[in-house]
Image (spheres, rainbow, N blue to C red):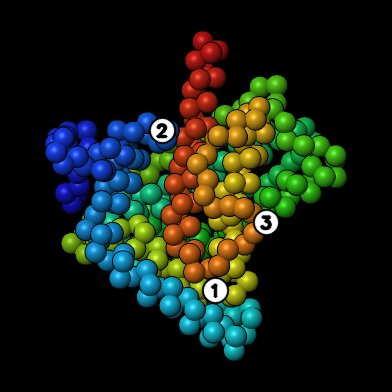
Amino acid sequence: MKHAPDFETLAHDTSDPNPWLALYLDRSTPLGDHVKQAWLADSSSASRQYFLPLVRPLARLLIILFQLVKIVMPRNARASGALHALLVWGLTRFVRPEANWLILRHFHIGSDILAFIARNAPQGVEVATDPLRPLAIADLRDHVFVRHDLNLFNFVIALNRQLKDLDLRLTPPERVNFSDLSEPPVRLEDMPNRWTNVLDLQTAIELFTPVYQIFLSDDDFWRATNSLQLDETIGSYCADLLNGHRYLAQVNNRHPLVPLSTLRAGFRLVLHGLASETLHALLRGYANEAAAAER
């Protein structure tokens, strides 16, 4: 592995305190130490400090230019296969191990959370899910990024249509079933680690966002960016199942009824990843408490 700070052993200089060490030791978020170590190692990298301020305005300019190009392109023009091949190539060769690890974890976590909600929905409500569990970057070629967005909207529509038809609401079940929640079986040490793998998560996302836009249809891109505002919605569903614990996730991608500009999609995607990790960790914490209470 490339050198990354070990926050467990990092010295504390009271005259020059390390802000990343403070965030690592802070326990106001429920992330596991291994996730927080990877997240902060990525966030404190030279790439994020020096590349991101240069990349972000250029990427947003490309989003504006590509939106103009889309005006004269066929509305349904898309090349999802080429997009995912390009994403796999870029992730494999240029993105830091910690960032790639967090990206692969995200699909497992999203699948777990939707399965948790579906399993604990009221009796009579049956929502099919399409679990996405890539173990390697090459697995993303199977249109995983696009399927991730489709899964979310299809889930929200199917769940709420059935609840409406049956005149039901999400309420705490007699016994909450946490069996769908598990630690993603993705290993950090298996991530590509060439000398070229230097881009941090935020810089990579900013670069890939306009690429995502130009290779997909306008509808696909708008759906992808608007899906980020459903973080609060999914958090509320989980809260309803857990007797109103509305502090479940630290959500910033809101409000779902007020779509935001696509220009900030890259930044909001990073928030989406962190919110998902936080919600998953909280649910697993509740699962451990429930298991301990039954012993």
> Of callouts 1 and 2, which one flags the residue occurring earlier in the amino acid sequence?
2
Are the two marked residues, 1 and 2, in contact with CB atoms closer than 8 angstroms?
no
Query: Seen in the image, is 234 located left or right of residue 28?
Result: right
Q: CA distance from mark 3 to mark 2?
A: 28 Å
Q: Is residue 37 above or below residue 54?
A: above
Q: CA distance from mark 1 to mark 3?
A: 24 Å
Q: Is residue 97 above or below residue 219?
A: above
On the image, the x and y values in percent for residue 273 come to: 46, 50
Q: Nearer the viewer, mark 1 or mark 3?
A: 3
Name the residue beneath numbered marker 2: 28
Query: Seen in the image, is 43 located left or right of residue 249?
Result: left
Q: Nearer the viewer, residue 5 or 149?
A: 5
> Of callouts 1 and 3, which one flags the residue occurring earlier in the amino acid sequence?
1
Q: CA distance from mark 1 to mark 2?
A: 38 Å
Name the residue beneath numbered marker 1: 216
Q: Residue at x 73, y 50 (%)?
A: 158
Q: Nearer the viewer, residue 144 or 247?
A: 247
Outermost residue, bottom direction? Answer: 72
Could you say whether the residue bearing mark 1 is in a helix, strand or loop? loop
Name the residue beneath numbered marker 3: 257
Res 121 → quadrant: top right
Q: Residue at x 62, y 62 (%)?
A: 259
Could you say whether the residue bearing mark 2 is in a helix, strand or loop? loop
Could you say whether the residue bearing mark 3 is in a helix, strand or loop? loop
> Of callouts 3 and 2, which one flags the residue occurring earlier in the amino acid sequence?
2
Asked whether residue 118 appears in the rendered view, the answer is yes
Q: Residues within 10 Å of mark 2 (few under 14, many from 20)?
A: few
Q: Is residue 103 above or below residue 125?
A: below
On the image, the x and y values in percent for residue 281 come to: 46, 35
